[in-house]
Image (spheres, helix red, strand yellow):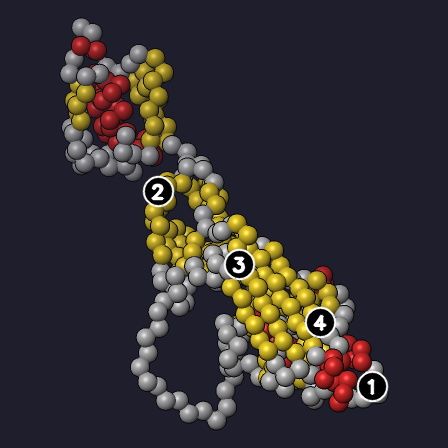
Amino acid sequence: MNTQEKSFCIDCKNKTLDVVFKECMDKYSIIISFDSKKCSSIRLSKSYAASSVDKLLQSVVYDTSMQLKVVRPNFFYVHEIVKRKYVVSGLIVDAETGEPLAGALVRLSFNQGTVSNEWGYYTMIALEGEYSMSVSYLGYKKSIYNLRIFKSVFFNIRMEPLPMHLGEVTITLEATNPFQPIINGGTLDLYFPNDRNVASRLGKKDALHALGAMPGVNMGNIGRGDVFVRGAQMDDNGFLVDGVPLYSINHLYGINSIFNINAINHIEMYRGNIPVRYGNYVGSVSNFHIKNGNMYKFSTEVSVGNYMSDILLQGPVLKEKSSFILSGRLGYPLIYHKIFRGANDADFIFTDLYGKFN
């Protein structure tokens, strides 16, 4: 009798896959080649029926990690499905400003996860399949995404800030450090979520002088602008903007630096174990990272002071894809020419202009 004319069924309830295969071979006079060790770890929970033996076997292995191949009539080969590995990566940013979020926690499963780097990028290797990916960051709403990974994917994430609802709080302190630096060995990362607590000189707040509040760092007297780190001299320190070396960082003999604090995202400062790529500095190296600019809307900030003014422009070039930021500063030389009559005007004339395209 032709086996294809039969109605084929098998009871698989509470049986392992290797046992089911052996019963099928005895019942329908077929040959199945399989790995007994791997199939013995797979337990089934229901019965199956089909119009042909190959369709019956396909139904049996459908919800397992095994795959069936028909070699020839009544001869079948079962092997384990080899899942491919793919790269899951992306950029995590603030949904309102587009600024990257460093240190955000990304999880694909209970034991698989990573954190975003200082530029907000994350990367993981994952097997193909379906995942529930969670992203969390202090001060932001936790985000959960359902991903089906069947190829390498670049997945950007925008995180919404949590609303802060606080009642009246009275705090009395004798002294405080307004910053929350991230310290890793000899490396210090100083972030500027706002400039409310940054010390000012002659009414203007300055990013360089914020370093003076950090442990092991001392600033020179007003009018000097020197930075002393753990006893090293000013010439022993290196200063960079996004990795580009600077050879002059002060205006007005050190009263203010060249950095517009509203354009600085954070300062990365090495106070020891300085990487060799920065040269022969023995005191410290400070790398000032400029903000990427708002990817979602245009904004302008103007600051007018008694001896200089700042302007900051930022906005999207291609919305949600690229952005720009432009910072400008202008001093008032005529005022100082009258006050310091006879002095060299060039010492009191200064302009700064720098920008970034992201």
Residue nearer the viewer, 343 or 291 = 343
Give the residue number, with chain letter if any, for mark 2: 130
Q: Residue furthest bottom?
A: 174
Labels 3, 2: front one: 3
Q: Quadrant of residue 310?
A: bottom right
- Sequence-wise, the earlier of marks 4 and 3 is 3
Label 2, secondary structure: give it. strand
Q: Amino acid at mark 3?
A: Gly
Pinpoint residue 151: horizontal percent, then vertical percent: 45, 37
Q: CA distance from mark 4 to mark 2?
A: 55 Å
Give the residue number, with chain letter if any, for mark 4: 351
Tell me whether circle 4 and circle 3 mark residues in contact (CB < 8 Å): no
At 74% from the left edge and 80% from the top edge, which residue is drawn? 333
Q: CA distance from mark 4 to mark 1?
A: 19 Å
Labels 4, 2: front one: 4
Q: Residues within 10 Å of mark 4 (few under 14, many from 20)?
A: some
Residue nearer the viewer, 278 or 251 = 251
Determine if residue 260 is in view. Answer: yes
Judged left or right of residue 109, residue 179 is right
Q: Amino acid at mark 1?
A: Ala
Q: CA distance from mark 4 to mark 3?
A: 23 Å
Determine if residue 230 is in view. Answer: no
Judged left or right of residue 209, residue 159 is left
